Amino acid sequence: MLTCPAPVTRVHTLREALVQRASHPHATVLAGGTDLMVYIELGSVQPTAILDLWGCTELRGISGDGRTLGALTTWSDVVGHPALPAALRDCARTVGAPQIQNRGTLGGNIVNASPAGDSLPLWLAMDAKFELASVRGVREVPASEFWLGYRKTALAADELLTRIHLHPHAGDRLHYRKVGTRLAQAISKVVLGGRLRVVDGVVTEARVALGSVAPTPIRAHHVEAALLGKPIDPAAAAAVAADIAPIDDIRSTAAYRRRVAANVIRAWLETEARTPS
Ligand SMILES: Cc1cc2nc3c(=O)[nH]c(=O)nc-3n(C[C@H](O)[C@H](O)[C@H](O)COP(=O)(O)OP(=O)(O)OC[C@H]3O[C@@H](n4cnc5c(N)ncnc54)[C@H](O)[C@@H]3O)c2cc1C
């Protein structure tokens, strides 16, 4: 049985949460707890106090147009939301299994900052902006500036991630692909989030983002550059070799990750190249 002697403060409004965060910046923030409870059980996190956000319902939910998502929105909320891009709903379906999807939150996945976090490449591909709030005010940080190093984020000690903002462009093609050992309950070996804008048969914007191949989720800038200004060219996938720095670990080898990263990008581009613009 899990034992954790730390006192728990449960908050029900964002204001309360921010005041508590400011006065107890060393408290461990708990959202769904699906990452945190594992770390507490392993002893790698030993909270002295816990700030429980779960009752903060104003941070849960998705705007009708799908452009604003509360940090406490769960993966199950995302799976069934018709205004969200299909790629994001595909991602939600691959997080753990329904039990984890019912409790795990978008904010937890983002702030946990695991290089293997399934949603992270998609936020990069969508140019998402993260709203960070404290009693000092609110600021927006682009996903591309949020993950600073291995499990290191731009969040200040008194801040909470409150919302995620999307700015979808009609006609953009968004793609998600996870490679893991199984379809459910598997930590990814490689994750791809991609977005293409094609105008008159020519790629005018490209985002190719990968997880599990570097200490943080990354943009594959060499692949993006190889795609721009011409018709979709699946051969651009080879440029990923210059973008990634995978490691050998218990889930996979660096060599496998290099090969699979190129393969999943190429497969996506081949499909897109066959799709009329
Ligand atoms: C069996 C199992 C399977 C899993 N499968 C997957 C998977 O397939 N893919 C995947 O990506 N993940 C997976 N996970 C990890 C986890 O479920 C997800 O990362 C989930 O989205 C975390 O959300 P949470 O609300 O539970 O986070 P929590 O555990 O509550 O928090 C995670 C971290 O984020 C911080 N935090 C949370 N919310 C905020 C906030 N709003 N502001 C500031 N800090 C915050 C916490 O302090 C903590 O450091 C799995 C976990 C388990 C146990």
Image (cartoon, helix red, strand yellow):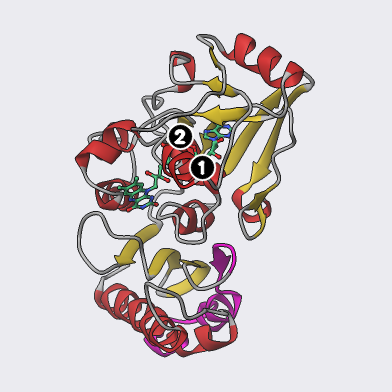
- Where disc 1 sits, the SS reads loop
- Quadrant in the picture for residue 159: top right
Q: Is 35 on the left or on the right of 47, as rendered?
A: left
Residue sitting at x 34%, y 83%? 263
Residue sitting at x 44%, y 38%? 106
Q: Is residue 231 covered in magenta?
A: yes
Q: Is residue 53 covered in magenta?
A: no
Q: Position of residue 274 (x, y in %)?
A: 25, 77
Q: Is residue 5 visible?
A: yes
Q: Is residue 128 visible?
A: no
Q: Is 275 on the left or on the right of 71, as rendered?
A: left
| Vertical placement of residue 221 versus 89, above or below | below
Residue sitting at x 47%, y 68%? 212
Q: Looking at the image, which residue sits at the far right?
A: 136
- Mark 1, Cα crowd under 10 Å, few <14 / some 14-19 / many 20+, is few
Which quadrant would the N terminus be assigned to in this image? Answer: top left
- Mark 2, Cα crowd under 10 Å, few <14 / some 14-19 / many 20+, is some
- Say whether mark 1 is within 8 Å of ligand 1: no
Q: Which residues are magenta?
A: 215-236
Along the line of sight, the residue nearer the viewer: 172 or 97: 97
Which quadrant would the C terminus be assigned to in this image? Answer: bottom left
> Disc 1 marks which residue?
167
- Where disc 2 sits, the SS reads loop
Three-letter code for the amino acid on which mark 2 is drawn: Arg
Three-letter code for the amino acid on which mark 1 is drawn: His
- Residues tagged 2 and 1 counted as in contact (Cβ below 8 A): yes
Q: Real-space Cα distance between discs 2 and 1?
A: 6 Å
* Total marks placed: 2
> Disc 2 marks which residue?
67
Along the line of sight, the residue nearer the viewer: 137 or 194: 137
